[in-house]
Image: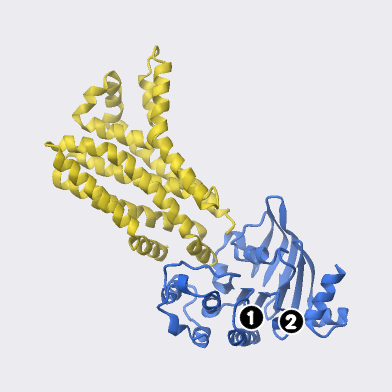
Chain colours: A yellow, B blue
C-alpha cells in the first residue's frame, strides 16, 4: 500500500496544476494580509475565498486526476493487490498532496501574519475541507465512466455545498420566520461541511456578535468542549461516509 | 487449476457471459476462440477479478477468487490493448511493477525484455510508443514474474512478424515448463502449433471445450483455421 501511495504522490507532485494552485493560494493569502491593517481582518477576508476556492479545486482536481489515472488503476487491479488498498492509497496520496498544497499556500502566511487560535482553526478547517472534498470527488468519479459527466457531477456538488445550500437555508429561514429556528439551524448547518467550517472560524473571530441571536445558540453549541468534539466527529464522518461508499462501489466496479 | 462454475455476467441488457463452466488444468495450452463480442475478454477479466461476475464462482487452486487477491501473483496478464500511465517512461513502468510485486514474485524473467530490445527505448514515455511497441512492453510484463498461469488476450495483434515469432517461441517454452497458457486470438494460424485445447465461445456461451486432436478428428480438417471455419459456418 505504501508503494502505491508513493507512486500517486510522485505523480501528483509532478503535476503543474498543484503547483499553480499553491501559488494562487499563496498570492491570495499574502495579498489579503498585506492589504488589511489588522491580522484578524486579513483572516476574515481570507475566510470567504478559502471556503470557496479550496473545496472547488480539491473536488475538480481529484475528479480529473482519477479519470486520468484510469490506466494506472486498470494496470494495478490485475496485479496481486487488494482493491480496497489501491483505492485508499489513491485517496491518501491525493489528500496528502492537496493538504500539503493548502498548508504551503495558506498555512504558511497565517503562521507568519496571524498565528492566533483563529488562524490555527482556519488551517485545520481548510485541511479537513480539502480531505472531505477529495473523498467526495472519488465518489463522484465512480458514478459514471464519462469524464465530462463525472466532472459535471462534482461541479454541481461543489455548487450545492458552496452556494445552493445557503440559499435553501435562507429560504427555509424566511418561510418559517414565525417559529423559533435557532436550534434547527444548528442541526441544518451540520448537513454542510463548508458551513460547519465557516461557523467554527467565525465563532473564533469577534465578528460573531454581528450574527445576532442565533449566534448565541451557535456559541453555546459550537463553542463548548462537547460541541467542538461533536463537530470534529461530524467532520470525520463527512470524510468517512463518502469514502466508505466509494470503496463499496469500487469493489464492485468492472474495469 | 482454474475452475469456473456457472459464471454469468450481464452488462445492462446484454448478456456477456451466460452460464460458463470450464476447467483449466496445469500444463494445458488453451485457445479461447469466438467471434467478436462473444465474451472472451469478459471471461478473461472475470478470471482476473477485473470484472465481477453476477452469479457463479471461479476458483483458483481450489480457492474462491472473490475474497482472495493473492492468487493474482500466479498470473501474468497481457491485456488486449495495453493501457499504461501515459506520463511514465518504459523503465518507470517496469520498475513500478517490479516494486509492486517484489514481495510475491522476487525472481524476474527478463528474457522478453531483452529479446524485444526494450533497453533501447527505456527512456521513452508510454504515450509516445507505437501500438506494437506497447504490446511488446505489455508482453514483457506478462512474462516478467515467471507466473504459473499466462493469460494472453490477442497477444500477436499489432506485433511485427519478428516479434510475433519471438513471442510464440517464448509461449512454447513456457508451455513446456508445464504452465497453464490461455490465449485468445483471431489469427488462428498463430495458434496451430502452440495450443493443445480449444474453447469455442459464441454469444456469451461456451459451445465446446475439447482437445485440438479431437476437434480435428470431429471436423476432418488438419488445420485449426479450417476446422474453426467449419464450426463457425455450421452454427
Image quarter hosting the N terminus of chain A: bottom left
Q: Is residue A142 above or below residue B61?
A: above
* Quadrant position of residue B119: bottom left
Q: x%, y% of residue A134?
A: 40, 48
> Mark 1 sits on what residue?
B179
Q: Is residue A103 visible?
A: no
Residue at coordinates 56% horizontally, 69% vertically from top-left?
B72
- Of tags 1 and 2, the one toward the viewer is 2
| Local SS, label 2 | loop
| Local SS, label 1 | loop
Q: x%, y% of residue B225?
A: 78, 80
Q: x%, y% of residue B101?
A: 47, 72
Label 1 marks a residue whose chain is B
Which label number is shown at residue A154? Answer: none
Label 2 marks a residue whose chain is B
Mark toward the start of the polypeptide (1 vs 2): 1
- Viewer-closest of A149 and B218: A149
Residue at coordinates 44% horizontally, 43% vertically from top-left?
A155
| Label 1 crowd bin: few (<14), some (14–19), many (20+), radius 10 Å | many
Q: Is residue A160 above or below residue B69?
A: above
Q: x%, y% of residue A93?
A: 38, 57
In the image, taking residue A178 as reference, residue B197 lies left or right, namely right
Q: Is residue B29 visible?
A: yes
* Quadrant position of residue B188: bottom right
- Viewer-closest of A165 and A183: A165
> Mark 2 sits on what residue?
B196
Amino acid at each position: 500500500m505504501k508503494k502505491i501511495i508513493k507512486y500517486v504522490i510522485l505523480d501528483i507532485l509532478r503535476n503543474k496544476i498543484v503547483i499553480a494552485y499553491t501559488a494562487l493560494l499563496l498570492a491570495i493569502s499574502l495579498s489579503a494580509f498585506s492589504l488589511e491593517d489588522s491580522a484578524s481582518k486579513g483572516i476574515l477576508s481570507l475566510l470567504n475565498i478559502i471556503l470557496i476556492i479550496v473545496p472547488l479545486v480539491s473536488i475538480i482536481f481529484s475528479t480529473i486526476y482519477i479519470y486520468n489515472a484510469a490506466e494506472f488503476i486498470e494496470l494495478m487491479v490485475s496485479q496481486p493487490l487488494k482493491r480496497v488498498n489501491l483505492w485508499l492509497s489513491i485517496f491518501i496520496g491525493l489528500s496528502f498532496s492537496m493538504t500539503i498544497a493548502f498548508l504551503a499556500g495558506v498555512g504558511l502566511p497565517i503562521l507568519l501574519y496571524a498565528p492566533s487560535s483563529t488562524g490555527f482553526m482556519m488551517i485545520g478547517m481548510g485541511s479537513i475541507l480539502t480531505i472531505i472534498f477529495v473523498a467526495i470527488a472519488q465518489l463522484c468519479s465512480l458514478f459514471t465512466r464519462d469524464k465530462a459527466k463525472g466532472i459535471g457531477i462534482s461541479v454541481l456538488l461543489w455548487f450545492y455545498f458552496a452556494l445552493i445550500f445557503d440559499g435553501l437555508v435562507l429560504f427555509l429561514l424566511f418561510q418559517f420566520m414565525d417559529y423559533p429556528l435557532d436550534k434547527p439551524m444548528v442541526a441544518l448547518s451540520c448537513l454542510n461541511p463548508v458551513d460547519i467550517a465557516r461557523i467554527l472560524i467565525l465563532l473564533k473571530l469577534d465578528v460573531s456578535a454581528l450574527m445576532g441571536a442565533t449566534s448565541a445558540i451557535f456559541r453555546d453549541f459550537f463553542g463548548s468542549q462537547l460541541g467542538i468534539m461533536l463537530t470534529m466527529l461530524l467532520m470525520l464522518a463527512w470524510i468517512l461516509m463518502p469514502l466508505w461508499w466509494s470503496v463499496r462501489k469500487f469493489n464492485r466496479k468492472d474495469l | 487449476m482454474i475452475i469456473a462454475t456457472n459464471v454469468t455476467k450481464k452488462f445492462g441488457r446484454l448478456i456477456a457471459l451466460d452460464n460458463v463452466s470450464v476447467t483449466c488444468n496445469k500444463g494445458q495450452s488453451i485457445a479461447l476462440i469466438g467471434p467478436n463480442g462473444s465474451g472472451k475478454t469478459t471471461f478473461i477479466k472475470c478470471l482476473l477479478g477485473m470484472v465481477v461476475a453476477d452469479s457463479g464462482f471461479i476458483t483458483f487452486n481450489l480457492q474462491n477468487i472473490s475474497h482472495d487477491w493473492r492468487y493474482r501473483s500466479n498470473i501474468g496478464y497481457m491485456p488486449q490493448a495495453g493501457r499504461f500511465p501515459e506520463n511514465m517512461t518504459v523503465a518507470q513502468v517496469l520498475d513500478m511493477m517490479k516494486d509492486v510485486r517484489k514481495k510475491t514474485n522476487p525472481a524476474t524473467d527478463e528474457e522478453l525484455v531483452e529479446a524485444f530490445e526494450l533497453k533501447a527505448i527505456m527512456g521513452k514515455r508510454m504515450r509516445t510508443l507505437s501500438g506494437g511497441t506497447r504490446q511488446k512492453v505489455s508482453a514483457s510484463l506478462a512474462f516478467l514474474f515467471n507466473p504459473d498461469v499466462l493469460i494472453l488476450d490477442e497477444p500477436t495483434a499489432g506485433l511485427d512478424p519478428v516479434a510475433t515469432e519471438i513471442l510464440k517461441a517464448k509461449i512454447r517454452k513456457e508451455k513446456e515448463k508445464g504452465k497453464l497458457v490461455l490465449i485468445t486470438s483471431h489469427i488462428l494460424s498463430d495458434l496451430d502449433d502452440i495450443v493443445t485445447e480449444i474453447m469455442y465461445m459464441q454469444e456469451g456461451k461456451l459451445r465446446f471445450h475439447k482437445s485440438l486432436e479431437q476437434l480435428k478428428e470431429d471436423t476432418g480438417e488438419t488445420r485449426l483455421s479450417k476446422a474453426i471455419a467449419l464450426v463457425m459456418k455450421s452454427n
